[in-house]
Every structure is written in structure tokens, then in C-alpha cells.
Image: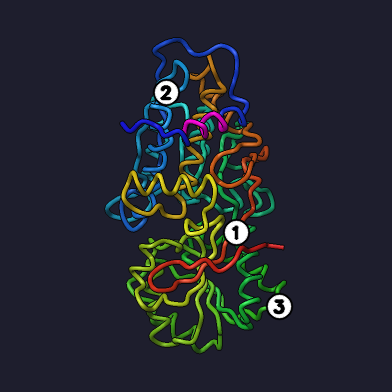
């Protein structure tokens, strides 16, 4: 196990003090607790999620897997299956039930996909297990009036106390920022499509509403579930007269094939995708067809990290001999929130409800994201930074910071 560097030693002090973790009375000597993550570790998402798992391990190793008298163990669960090659609802439910059934588990880092969170929130909530997502962005998971009429209440049946939080901004911000940016890029007519999943359709609908406010003309709106090709849709987009396509969805659903087929039949139509497609694996899969495409992301890409974020990224690259994907730093931040919550729980570190309440009560947290942030009572981060990127030479080139306003 690598010992922590002076930078991380200083950082840990800042994290704990900023989160109000110095509480009286520690856990009994020899106390062991466990945290788990639930992410798709099979299929295309692995390129992204492996860096999240690496980041979680980094956060724990920096404190030698120990806070006070409490030893922290970690297990990475896979919520994808070989058959689906992406997250699977039944597998996510099994992971959540496994966590509930192990009394040593006091926190759950996940999920990666918003649809998976929809499955596990009520299961974990009933057991008082706190949940911190490094990547979910569907608004309805936390915000009333931003999803279906029964959201988010349906995730908390029988008066279950809120247990879910996320360290990334939600799609009501990303979708609006994307529409505003597309207008700035000169778009006039847009064809909107999505993968028909909770995240993808939700994001497409947010974009759709914002695009109207921006004065963009909608020339098509159609679901594009996972398929072996999208030639018929590509031709429909061409015939629509669109100058831009907006896609809401994830790379796991073969969205790179949509980019390829669109480039074949209508090379002048521009493409914009969200953070669900902002991965190096997507760029590799789409190949030359993705050159010049635009992407939005709820945060700042690794190429633009400064200060603590840059120091963290440099340490990651040295340790793992590779670049962190865009969500890796949020996996690290989520793990630090959990570590701080366990510390704050003190003598109640084995009490799931105490750890959950400490997570949900996170205020003025000074991690590595560039500024202090807090969770709202609903579990949303106070951070709102958005970035616009463009595919260039097989990489994501930072273009500008985006705003939903």
C-alpha cells in the first residue's frame, strides 16, 4: 500500500475540518466498517468506471483505510451483466440487497446510471443506507417537478428518510446549457433523439424545452434504442433539414454507430452529446466520424484542472499510469464525503443512520473540485459548473465554460 504524500496529508486535514468531522468519542478499537460501490464494470462503461474505482481506492489508501479506530474495507460491485453489456436493473437490485444484508456496510457509492439509482434508492433507504453518486444526473431523482409527477417521492415510500445524494450537477442544468450553447454555435434547426432510458430521455426532454426557449426549430424528436445500426434514422435526420442533432443517452447503447451512420449520409450535420457520451471509449468507437462533434459535461474536464484538482490528477496518473476519465474525480470526492461522514459519526460509525445523516448534512466541503460545496436537503450539490468540449484528433478539447442561464 502506497503511503500518502504530504499534499494528501494536508488535504485530508482540510476535508475533515471543513466537514465538521471532529466529534467527541471515537468508535471502539478494532471496529471495522465497509463501503461498496455499484457501477457497470462489464461492457463499454468499464473504461470510465474503472477510473472511478481507482479513485475511490486512492481516497481510502491516503488514510491507510482507517479513520480513528475504524478500519474501512471496500468492495467494488458490478451492476452490469455480460448479456446486456451495460447496467441491468435486476443486477442493481441484487447489489442493493447484498449491501442491505451485510450489516458491516455503512455506505453505498453509486450508481453510475440514473436508471440504476431508481432501482436501488428505495431498497437502501429502507435500511438507512446512505448513497452517494459520482455520476447520476437525472433531475427527477431529487427534484420535484423536474421528472414524473410522483418523483422523487416514490423513491421514499412509507416516510423513508432521504438517503440519496450526488456530487455532480443534474441534467436540468446540463440540458439547458446545451441548448444555449447550440444556439451560440449557430444552430437553427435541431433533430432531438435519445436512447429511451431514464437518463437519456430525461435529458433530451430538458434540452427540448430549453431549445424552444432559445428559438431553435425542432424538426424531429425520436427514440433511438440500442441497435446494430441507425441508417434509417440517419436518413430521416438528413431529410428533416436539421443542421444539428442532439442525442440524449449513453455510449453503451451504440450511440457511436449513430454518429457514424449520420456522418455517412449527412456529413455537414453537427452532433452534440451529453456526459453519457463524453468518454475516450466513445471517441475510439466512433472514429473519424466524431471529429468536430460537441459535448457537454457537468463539471470541468481533466485537461482544465488547476490547483488541488490538478495535483490529484497528477497523482492519479503517476499511480495508475493513465489519464483519469471525466467522472473519476467525482468518485474520489464521493469517497472523501463517505470517509468524512464515518469520521463525523464517531462512536456511531457502525450505525448506518448516523453515517447517512452525516453524508446528507455535508456542508462547506473542501475537497478537490476547486471550491467549497454543500448538499441541499434533497441531496443535490451546490456546484453548477458546466463545460463544453469538442472532439479533435481523438481527444476532447475544452471549448468553454457553460451556463444554463
Q: Is residue 181 above or below residue 172?
A: below
Q: Position of residue 180 (x, y in %)?
A: 66, 70
Assign a secondary structure to mark 3. Answer: loop
Q: Are marks 1 and 3 in contact (CB under 8 Å)?
A: no
Q: Which residue is mark 2?
A: 66
Q: Range of the magenta residues?
A: 8-15
Q: Is residue 55 above or below residue 265?
A: above
Relative horizontal placement of residue 123, taking residue 80 as reference (left or right): right
Image quarter for residue 323? bottom left
The answer to which of marks 1 and 2 sits earlier in the sequence is 2
Q: Nearer the viewer, residue 168 or 326?
A: 326
Q: Which residue is mark 1?
A: 386
Image quarter for residue 72? top left
Separation of marks 1 and 3 at Cα, in angstroms:
21 Å
Q: Nearer the viewer, residue 117 or 359?
A: 359
Q: Which mark is residue 215?
A: 3
The answer to which of marks 1 and 3 sits earlier in the sequence is 3
Assign a secondary structure to mark 2. Answer: strand
Q: Nearer the viewer, mark 1 or mark 3?
A: 1
Amino acid at each position: 500500500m502506497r503511503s500518502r504524500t504530504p499534499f494528501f496529508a494536508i488535504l485530508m486535514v482540510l476535508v475533515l475540518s471543513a466537514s465538521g468531522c471532529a466529534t467527541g468519542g471515537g468508535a471502539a478499537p478494532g471496529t471495522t466498517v465497509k463501503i461498496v460501490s455499484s457501477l457497470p464494470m462489464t461492457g463499454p462503461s468499464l473504461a470510465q468506471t474503472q477510473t472511478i474505482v481507482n479513485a475511490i481506492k486512492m481516497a481510502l489508501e491516503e488514510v491507510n483505510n482507517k479513520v480513528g479506530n475504524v478500519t474501512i474495507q471496500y468492495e467494488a460491485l458490478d451492476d452490469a451483466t455480460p448479456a446486456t453489456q451495460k447496467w441491468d436493473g435486476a443486477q442493481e437490485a441484487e447489489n442493493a440487497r447484498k449491501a442491505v444484508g451485510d450489516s458491516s456496510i455503512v455506505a453505498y457509492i453509486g450508481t453510475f446510471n440514473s436508471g440504476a439509482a431508481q432501482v436501488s434508492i428505495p431498497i437502501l433507504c429502507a435500511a438507512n443506507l446512505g448513497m452517494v453518486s459520482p455520476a447520476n444526473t437525472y433531475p427527477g431523482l431529487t427534484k420535484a417537478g423536474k421528472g414524473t409527477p410522483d418523483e422523487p417521492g416514490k423513491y421514499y415510500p412509507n416516510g423513508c428518510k432521504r438517503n440519496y445524494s450526488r456530487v455532480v450537477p443534474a441534467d436540468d442544468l446540463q440540458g439547458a446549457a446545451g441548448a444555449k450553447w447550440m444556439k451560440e454555435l449557430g444552430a437553427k434547426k435541431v433533430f432531438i433523439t435519445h436512447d429511451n432510458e431514464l437518463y437519456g430521455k430525461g435529458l433530451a426532454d430538458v434540452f427540448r424545452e430549453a431549445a424552444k426557449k432559445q428559438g431553435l426549430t425542432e424538426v424531429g424528436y425520436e427514440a433511438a434504442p440500442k441497435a446494430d445500426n441507425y441508417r434509417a434514422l440517419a436518413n430521416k435526420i438528413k431529410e428533416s433539414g436539421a443542421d444539428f442533432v442532439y442525442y440524449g443517452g449513453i455510449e453503451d447503447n451504440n450511440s457511436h454507430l449513430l454518429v457514424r451512420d449520420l456522418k455517412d449520409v449527412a456529413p455537414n450535420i453537427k452532433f452534440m452529446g451529453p456526459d453519457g457520451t463524453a468518454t475516450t471509449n466513445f471517441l475510439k468507437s466512433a472514429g473519424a466520424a466524431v471529429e468536430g462533434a460537441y459535448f457537454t459535461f457537468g463539471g470541468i474536464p481533466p485537461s482544465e484542472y488547476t490547483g488541488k484538482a490538478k495535483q490529484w490528477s497528477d497523482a492519479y496518473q503517476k499511480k495508475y499510469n493513465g489519464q483519469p476519465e471525466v467522472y473519476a474525480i467525482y468518485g474520489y470526492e464521493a469517497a472523501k464525503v463517505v470517509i468524512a461522514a464515518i469520521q463525523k459519526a464517531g462512536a456511531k460509525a457502525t450505525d448506518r443512520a448516523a453515517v447517512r445523516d452525516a453524508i446528507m448534512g455535508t456542508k462547506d466541503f473542501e475537497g478537490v473540485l476547486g471550491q467549497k460545496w454543500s448538499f441541499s436537503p434533497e441531496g443535490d450539490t451546490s456546484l453548477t459548473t458546466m463545460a463544453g468540449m469538442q472532439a479533435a484528433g481523438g481527444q476532447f478539447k475544452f471549448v468553454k465554460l457553460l451556463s444554463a442561464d
